[in-house]
Image: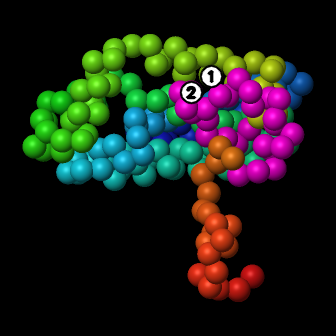
Amino acid sequence: MRLNSVYYSLVAAISLTCWFGTQEAMAFVTVTVQPAHQDVFAGSNAVVSAYATAKAGLVRFSETLAAEAQPLGVDVNCIAPGAMGTAMMQAVLDAGSDQAGVRDYEAAQKIMARGGGIETRAVELAVFLAAAASDGITGRLISAVWDAWENIPSQWGKLKDSDVFTLRRITPKERGFQGLENDVR
């Protein structure tokens, strides 16, 4: 993943919005690839750490850029389109189950056998986020496949001040654990 190209493209797009005025504020969407399940390719594939780090970086970049662009009326979100039949999936198949790991190899087989179709859902989400119906929805990681994103506008009043659809640290206290946090605040 080339993070520089994403960064410079979005900065240029927001700059153009500022140049032409914010009355026609546009929704900008960053796209990242989400595997079929959280730890797919967690086996012996040595390049996964860089891939996963780049994905997390894009998500956090999207959240930060959303906060910076909000005064301009620009919405920034990150789409997780779902696992697709890509060159990376083919590389897992080419590597075989011994090198890629049985679990990752079988997951890649299912994804490649499924063929197309999942891409349509990702495109529909991108169109939704660019439409007026989603105005104000910003700073979120939304799964095209797993999230009922069509219903977000009806619940945005509650969602906008929550950490739902974001990348964040969950503290032990938030999950009922005691004695695992220092009170240094």
Dots 2 and 1: beta carbons under 8 Å?
A: yes
To which residue does mark 1 refer? 125
Magenta segment boundaries in residue numbering: 138-163
> Which of 163/30 is in front?
163
Locate residue 170, reporting x and y percent: 62, 63
Q: Secondary structure at mark 2?
A: loop
Locate residue 99, reporting x and y percent: 12, 44
Q: Secondary structure at mark 1?
A: helix
Give the distance between the C-alpha atoms of the residues marked 2 and 1, in whole angstroms: 6 Å
Residue situated furthest front in the rendering: 176
- Looking at the image, can residue 114 be seen? yes
Residue 79 quadrant: top right
Q: Residue at x 62, y 75 (%)?
A: 177
Instruction: State which quarter of the image contains the C terminus.
Output: bottom right
Is 180 on the left-hand or right-hand side of 116? right
Q: Amino acid at mark 1?
A: Leu
Asked if residue 75 is positioned above or below residue 139 in the image, the reply reads above
Which numbered marker is on residue 144? 2
Is 162 on the left-hand or right-hand side of 109? right
Mark 2: few/some/many CA within 10 Å (<14, 14-19, 20+): many
Instruction: State which quarter of the image contains the N terminus.
Output: top left
Q: Residue at x 54, y 22 (%)?
A: 122
Locate residue 115, reporting x and y percent: 34, 14
Q: Residue at x 53, y 27 (%)?
A: 145
Q: Residue at x 47, y 44 (%)?
A: 55
